[in-house]
Amino acid sequence: MNTEKKTILVTGGMGYIGSHTTVALIEQGFDVVIVDNLSNSSSFILERIQQISGVLPKFYQVDCCDKAALEKVFIQENSIVASIHFAALKAVGESVEKPMLYYKNNLVSLMNIIELQLQYEIPKLVFSSSCTVYGEPDFLPVTEKSEIKPATSPYGNTKQIGEEIILDISRNSPLQAIALRYFNPVGAHASALIGELPNGTPNNLVPYITQTAIGKQPYLRVFGNDYNTPDGTCIRDYIHVVDVAAAHVAALNRLLIIPERPQFEFFNIGTGNGNTVLEVIHAFENATGVKLPYQIYPRRDGDIEKVYANTDLSNNVLGWKSNLNIEQMMASAWAWEQKLSTIK
Ligand code: NAD
Ligand code: UDP
């Protein structure tokens, strides 16, 4: 029996989804090499990964836009069999202010990774995409065949262009790729040792909820209650980050094990359920017993009214399914926020 472990290059592996995926990969018997420039993460995450998994992954503090530095990783780590490319900047508002930063960081890093993977003949890639590619959908739930709508921010555009770059290159080279279109990843690892580390005041709903509950924010602003939804607030498909991490292991196994596949595939990664903002608040209160102060505010510019996933393809083709419900998402996010407040 071949017992040699397969090594996976995880760019952005110190970040929110990357750290949870690293833990899942180690638990499934992979070796992990992390590349991260720590632009949106902290070095203490590495020891946390070790605490959870019992393994300290190799870590290179390298910017994926620096091709020469990235190539040194490929030269040194000659047992890599595939990569998962998380490294990207992700703040929608900041991308509107600094489009050049976003296009350069997110697209140059992707092109460098692909070029080096082709050069070193390890052409299997999992790419972090997003449900933002569907914009405001005409039909719900959205399937992978739903129309791709013009991006409403430079960040969203980097995901659309990223998918197009992969598609074009895969048509003309050995590149084999899977793009995972995440819906709204939330929650934290059950150990509460890793989770989301928002930079400054959070823009996203769940970190804002937990920061309000712990007293860092006075109250939650609910952006709009006059949408065409059951309670008037927007609907999203919230998915536990631990389930998102498991989807990457499934995608990787598909790339490594199944020989007959299209060269480029994409999958929705959501639960298939939509929840309104008020439902999320109530789920948080139920799961934690903490009452959340909130006020209704005007709509936030650029918000989509409702979006949630059809997950048939990821369930049937990837063999992956979400397991954790909205209360579990809220309870784990709360445990992480409480733990954070003891170390910050
Ligand atoms: P994150 O910011 O927590 O993690 C990204 C990591 O990449 C960070 O550790 C950061 O330091 C690193 N990084 C950024 N640019 C880099 C570069 N040039 N070189 C090396 N490292 C770099 O974000 P996340 O929430 O874990 O998101 C991971 C991926 O998933 C991103 O591509 C993001 O766009 C995508 N995504 C996230 C969400 C979400 O809601 N979190 C939704 C859809 C898609
Ligand atoms: N939201 C809110 N208050 C906040 C942050 C978000 O009411 O402080 C709402 C937002 O309007 C949207 C939903 O929560 O309807 C999810 O927002 P988030 O930014 O987390 O995700 P995205 O809009 O990118 O899907």
Image: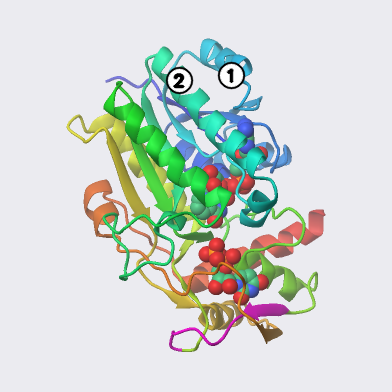
Q: Residue at x 70, y 78 (%)?
A: 220
- Mark 1 vs 2, N-terminal side: 1
Q: Residues within 10 Å of mark 1 (few under 14, many from 20)?
A: some
Circle 1/circle 2 CB separation < 8 Å: yes
* Residue 325 shown left or right of residue 210 in the figure: left
Q: Secondary structure at mark 1?
A: helix
Where on the picture, by quarter, is residue 299?
Answer: bottom right
Q: Residue at x 73, y 74 (%)?
A: 212
Q: Is mark 2 within 8 Å of ligand 1?
A: no
Q: Is residue 267 above or below residue 84?
A: below
Residue 115 badge: 2
Identify the main secondary structure in magenta: loop
Residue 49 placement: quadrant: top right
Q: Which mark is residue 42?
A: none
Q: Quarter of the image containing the C terminus?
A: bottom right
In magenta, the rendered stretch is 220-230
Q: The residue under label 1 is which amino acid type?
A: Lys
In the image, what residue occupies the spot 59% across and 13% down? 72
- Image quarter where ligand 2 lies: bottom right
Residue identifier under label 1: 67
Q: Residues within 10 Å of mark 2 (few under 14, many from 20)?
A: some
Judging depth in this view, the residue of 38 and 188 nearest the camera is: 38
Instruction: Residue 49: tell me if it is visible.
Output: no
Q: Position of residue 142 (x, y in %)?
A: 32, 64
Q: Is residue 190 above or below residue 27?
A: below
Does 267 lie within the magenta span?
no
Element type where label 2 sits in the image = helix
Quadrant in which the N terminus appears: top left
Q: Residue furthest top?
A: 75
The residues bearing labels 1 and 2 have C-alpha atoms spaced at a distance of 9 Å
Extreme residue in the left direction: 260
Q: Is residue 187 above or below residue 99?
A: below
